[in-house]
Amino acid sequence: MPCGLFHTAYQTDERIYKSIWVKAWLVAFGLFLLLLPLFVRDYVLYISNMIYIFVVGAIGLNILTGFTGQISIGHGAFMAVGAYASAILTTKLGLPFWISLPCAGFFAAFTGMIFGIPSLRIKGLYLAIATLAAQFIIEYTIIHWERLTNGITGMSVPSPSLFGFVFDTDKKFYYLLLGFAALAVITGRNLFRTRVGRAFIAIRDRDISAELIGVDIFKYKLLAFGISSFYAGVAGSLWGHYTNVITPEHFTIVLSIDYLAMIIVGGLGSILGTVLGVIFMILIPEFLTTVAVLLKSTFGEITTLISAIKGLVFGLTIVLFLLFEPDGLSEIWRRTRDYWNLWPFSYR
Amino acid sequence: MPENIAFLAQLVLTGIVLGSVYSLVALGFVLIYKSTSILNFAQGELLMFGAYVCLTFIVGFQVPYIWAFLLTLAFSFILGVMVERVMLRPMIGKPIISIIMLTIALSVVLRSLMQIFWGTETKVFPPTFSDVPIRFLGLFIAEIHLFSLIFAVACVILFVRFFKFSSAGLAMRVTAFDQQIAQTLGINIKRIFALSWAISAIVSSIGGIILGNINGINNSLAAMGLKVFPCIILGGLDSVVGAIVGGFFIGVLENLAGGYLDPVFGGGVKDVAPFVFLVIMLMIKPYGLFGKVHIERL
Amino acid sequence: MERRTICILILLWVAAFIFCPQGNSGAYAAETIKIGAVVDLTGPTNDIGVPYAQGIADYFDKINKEGGIKGRMIEYFPIDYGYKLPQAMAAYKRLATEHNVIALIGWGTGDSKVRIPLVSKDKIPQLTTFALEQTEPHTPYNFAHMISYEHQIMGMLQYAKDHPLEKGRKVRVAYVYSDAEYGRAPIRYLKERNFAEKLGLELVDEQIISQTATEAVSQALTLKKAKPDYAIVVLTPKPASVFVKDAKKVGLEATIMGFSFLGDYSLLKLLGEAGKGLIVAAPCSYGHETDVAGIKKIWDYNKKYHPERKVIDLQYVYGWLYGMILEEAIKKAGDNLTGEGLKNALETCKNFETDGISRPITFTPTDHRGSYEFKLSIANPEKGTFEPLSDWIKVEK
């Protein structure tokens, strides 16, 4: 394996696959994912499907927060908009899933852009608070606009179908979701090779300078909110059609915080980090539940403790990552990969 | 008093009582923001901590009220210092998103720890106030509400005086204004940070003890931490006066919204109205009524 | 530890998770009866969710300590979902596919409702909460042992009608309920049918209290303005205590009638003096009524294995009852110990005696609600318990 990469042209620097080995590993990984359902139990497929859905949503948030530097604590609400939009379009208007999905994305994007308008006037902390308010307001609207959303009872959402082929099992959904997740990753990664992506990064790094060199800050900030919420809306729609039911309880502030945790633990500003972060944050509760079930024989106060311990572990994980590994899992990955690249040598 | 006016007055009165507690908590929040520029999402948990600790002293150790109160303040002080030292000190200079996330994570950690120690049942302070409300000009006010109002206002006045006139308070204000200037004056910045967290914890604890006395303690109290945001946006993130005004205003707004708009919208308006107000505030006057307007210079 | 070792360990765990053919089976023999539960131990309803979960667990523990059912032990998997729907869905997935349970005990109205199509598809009978719609004929795998919330309220409204405070005018009632599904569903049901009006009562107001409310003064004030005689409360103890205390603080004079979940000792402790006159619907016996044979059995078990426990909550008894019903159904199912077999066995339960804790429970293929009767009880704040106020009231469907 190569010890280092020496680029001699911008083109080669921009390339995503830095060497042929990366491509090979990627293909192998892709094959692994494609073949997974054949030899694995349903529950693992369920977990994988959740990971794919959240990858789509989390990439959206990372685009907004990690790449454009706009803090958003309302991502869960935008996911809700997408989920409900898709549910309403399919149940009340009878539209097929393949139309309602992009529509859901656009609805969410539109909502996101509306709540992004304050970002023109306010920055940083104030924007975070505004998105927090957005979370509560959207949640309230969903609960109380009962004629449209059925309120707190929730809506049942039909499984998507294509020419008669209905996606109603974990296995069938697996391939669908794998496709969407892959699409999200590819578009996300390539976004930052385009002009728009570079504008986002410029805004994050120093927005005044960006404005000076001619980047229209307001337009690009709104665009960031829009794109980010589009991803969230798509993820929400997928989630709704997968679990066949959505309620306002799905999309509380806890969801927004979970998303933030995923991208922070994974690594802000890194698509790979997003994927790692999602996997990590979804597997940790699973791991703890396994422990809890193993210890179930000592029921009583212990089980309640385990539940509180889950919360504790969640919080501590984030704290530890922030204190000791602020660049997240993507940084750990990079170091590990370099370690294996150079093994048995220890220096770059 | 004619019934409609009485209804309005009652709502406003209760709003003022609750608003006094919001002011206390908002004060704690602003304190931390002023000196360290950190948005403390764990304010609600600090509040809960005070309530639980005080309860343990009174019920568990049979300590008389006044001593339990002072001991709780001492514990809160220690908690504030510990949090600052362990978690926030290493984060100096890191991007804002990390710090916000850290306080969010901190709130989860504190809440889980409190759940492990104190369980999840609602606990009450031993009854010291009669439940029979006092009648006053045709209005009702519960004894505990009256006491809370007086106590909260007293605390607010005390802290404002501390802030304005004591040397520690002066040091904190200088640090908030410009950390470098403060350092050139010989002020130990780290100690000031720890002090602001400690005082914020104390103030929140007092709020928690008051709230705990009014309606019992359970982990729902932590939601206060989020209610505080509309208060400080109204008042201005870095204004002490603003926090106080904001607290009272939001308390009254909540109750008025609940009393008049709940029947119209079918409930829940009380909880969302402050946030709608927050968004409106952010659009027209983002820095609040009393906050310092930030003008960016190139 | 070297970085290499850590990497390998992590990979091993992930591989084990992905490729292990069977879920965790614990230390039990292969032929165990697997039962799962989705309970709230840490969420907003956990003040009564925890005793409920304990009641179920203790009953199964009792069975196992007595040698199991026909020699087979019960393997019980409770999963805490914190009253959050997504967690409930994940917990259900886990129980159905990892642990392959043959029965599921549920808790929250909202999540149980959502699970109805799933349990029908997976053929796992769900024994759960008490909202009416869930046990209509379209829910073949859903069972509820006690009277529904809707019926309790109907019974309480009848009581209000029979006990007017002032002769010569209609009795005035108001609904005070939670914003969660367990509050909204029954009230919606009753309002759709104009039940209160049809009964000859005047519905003067309704108030919604958030499940996580820390104060409810504005709601209490608005309610007071409407001057109800009776306030029907559909709240769990946490928000109920907030509401009742605030109601007393603003001088509300209505008699408060609560549905079954308000029959909680800690609630009485919280309310103190404010609990005087509180009327609560009781579908089964309270934990302090040790003259009932079934309750005595509960205390016998606890004295032996949990001597530190001094209080048996009403919710504990609910959970215990489900344990009893499942034991009976498992015995009836004989060798056909699958989800479907269990469901059929449950449907043959006729007049199942619960040692006096509740009225006899009957399930039929078209009616999956075990009982339509309840008693009214009144709070005794000094003793901290509830005294009987009426005999068994039967509510027509």
Image (cartoon, grey):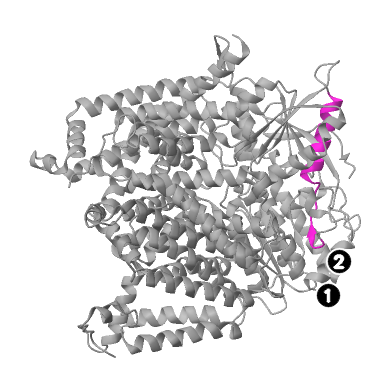
Q: Secondary structure at mark 2?
A: helix
The answer as to whether the residues below labels 1 and 2 share one chain is yes
As for residue B199 lying within the magenta part, the answer is: no
- Badge 2: residue crowd in 10 Å (few <14, some 14–19, many ≥20): many
> What is the chain identity of the residue bearing mark 2?
C
Range of magenta residues:
C140-163
In this picture, residue A58 sits left or right of residue C22: left
- Examine the structure image and report whether residue C147 is included in the region drawn in magenta: yes
In the depicted view, which residue is nearer to us: C31 or C147? C147
Residue B155 placement (x, y as % from top left)? 35, 25
Determine if residue A298 is in view. no
- Contact? badges 1 and 2 (CB < 8 Å): yes
C4 vs A130, nearest the viewer: A130
Of mark 1 and mark 2, the one earlier in the sequence is 1
The type of residue carrying mark 1 is Asn
Image quadrant containing the N terminus of chain B: top right
In the picture, residue B279 is in which quadrant?
Answer: top left
Percent across and percent down for residue B2 are: 61, 10
- State the image quarter where residue A292 is shown: bottom right
Q: Nearer the viewer, residue C88 or A289?
A: C88
Q: Element under label 1?
A: loop
Looking at the picture, does residue B146 appear above or below residue A76?
Answer: above
Mark 2 is on which residue type? Ala
* Residue B270 placement (x, y as % from top left): 54, 33
Q: What distance separates the C-alpha of mark 1 from that of mark 2?
A: 9 Å
